[in-house]
Image: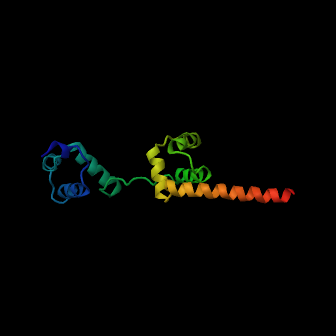
Amino acid sequence: MEVAATRQHAHQNTAYHCLLAYYKLGYFKQHLAHVFNKSERTLSNWIKTYEQTGVFQRAKRTSERTFSRTWLLSYYSDHPLAYLDKYQAPFTRAHHIAISKTSVWRIIHEEGLTWKVLERRAMHIKEKDVFRFVEELSYVD
């Protein structure tokens, strides 16, 4: 077997078949370790996890933190024309968590906020400010 394939996580079917052979067919861990090209410790971990949880799959990824996503999007609505690196420092100060430019970019793009959209919103905001200012000046007279 190739060395590159031995250092990766086993597919859930591999764990399933190994547990099936251990429990139903009665094979020993040593034999299964050789057949599935995994260490006996790995097989013991699979067995222990299955006995404790009743599930043989690896744990799913935890849910994303929505507070950081909403915070970033609200910050973007307040500062629409800043560059990605200008959002890292305020985010770190607010949440005490480092964030990469790539993560910032991914979050805003998942919400459909491209640079062009943000630029249009900024122009619209500036236009609204101008109209508001003109309206306030008309009341001064």
Residue 122 image position (x, y, % from top left): 60, 54
- Quarter of the C terminus within the rendering: bottom right
Q: Nearer the viewer, residue 14 or 29?
A: 14
**Left or right, residue 58 beside residue 24:** right
**Left or right, residue 10 beside residue 95:** left
Residue 34 image position (x, y, % from top left): 13, 46
Residue 133 image position (x, y, % from top left): 75, 55
Q: Is residue 38 visible?
A: no
Task: State the colouring used for the structure image.
Answer: rainbow
Q: Residue at x 56, y 46 (%)?
A: 82
Q: Nearer the viewer, residue 90 or 83?
A: 83
Q: Residue at x 17, y 57 (%)?
A: 21
Q: How many badges with numbers are in the image?
A: 0
Q: Is residue 11 above or below residue 98?
A: below
Q: Nearer the viewer, residue 32 or 12?
A: 12
Q: Residue at x 61, y 56 (%)?
A: 123
Q: Is residue 97 visible?
A: yes
**Left or right, residue 129 beside residue 45:** right
Q: Nearer the viewer, residue 118 or 34?
A: 118
Outermost residue toward the right in this view: 141
